[in-house]
Amino acid sequence: MQMVNVGFNNFVAVERIIAILNPESAPMKRLREEARQSNALVDATQGRRTRSIILMDTGTVVLSGIQEETLAQRVTHTAVKDV
């Protein structure tokens, strides 16, 4: 199982990631709030500003302090290393 650093030494499984999203839109803010209410939110920002939202296949929503472009590069690099 390949893991990717989502910031501040927090890791998620690459195989479980469905999408990496920008947190600024209204639908993403609703998604974050719904996940918080249903106890499916993991805050990996370490108190910093949320710069991306990671949607997992388990329904879990992970908040990250890393830009979505940077995370996408990390996931791609990790997946390529695995091949």
Image (cartoon, grey):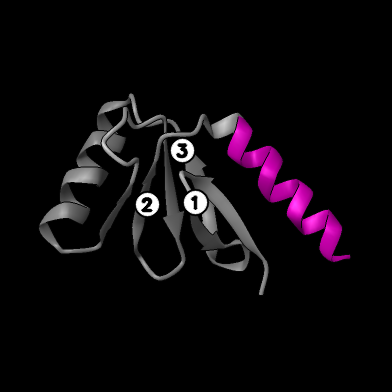
Mark 1 crowdedness (10 Å alpha carbons): few <14, some 14-19, many ≥20:
few
Location of the C terminus (image quadrant): bottom right
- Marks 3/2 in contact by CB < 8 Å: the verdict is no
- Marks 1/3 in contact by CB < 8 Å: the verdict is no
Q: Nearer the viewer, residue 27 or 62?
A: 62
- Mark 1 or 3, which is nearer the eye? 1
Residue type indicated by callout 2: Val
Residue type indicated by callout 1: Asn
Residue with the mark numbered 1: 9
Q: Position of residue 47 (x, y in %)?
A: 26, 36
Residue 16 position (above or below residue 48): below
First reached walking from the N terminus: tag 3 or tag 2:
3
The magenta segment? 70-83
First reached walking from the N terminus: tag 1 or tag 3:
1
| Residue depicted at x 57% and y 51% | 5
Residue with the mark numbered 2: 62
- Mark 2 or 1, which is nearer the eye? 1
Residue with the mark numbered 3: 21
- Marks 2/1 in contact by CB < 8 Å: the verdict is no
| Residue depicted at x 22% and y 55% | 35
Q: CA distance from mark 2 to mark 1?
A: 14 Å
Element class at badge 3:
strand
Residue type indicated by callout 3: Leu
Which image quarter: residue 3? Answer: bottom right
Does the magenta run of residues contain 5? no
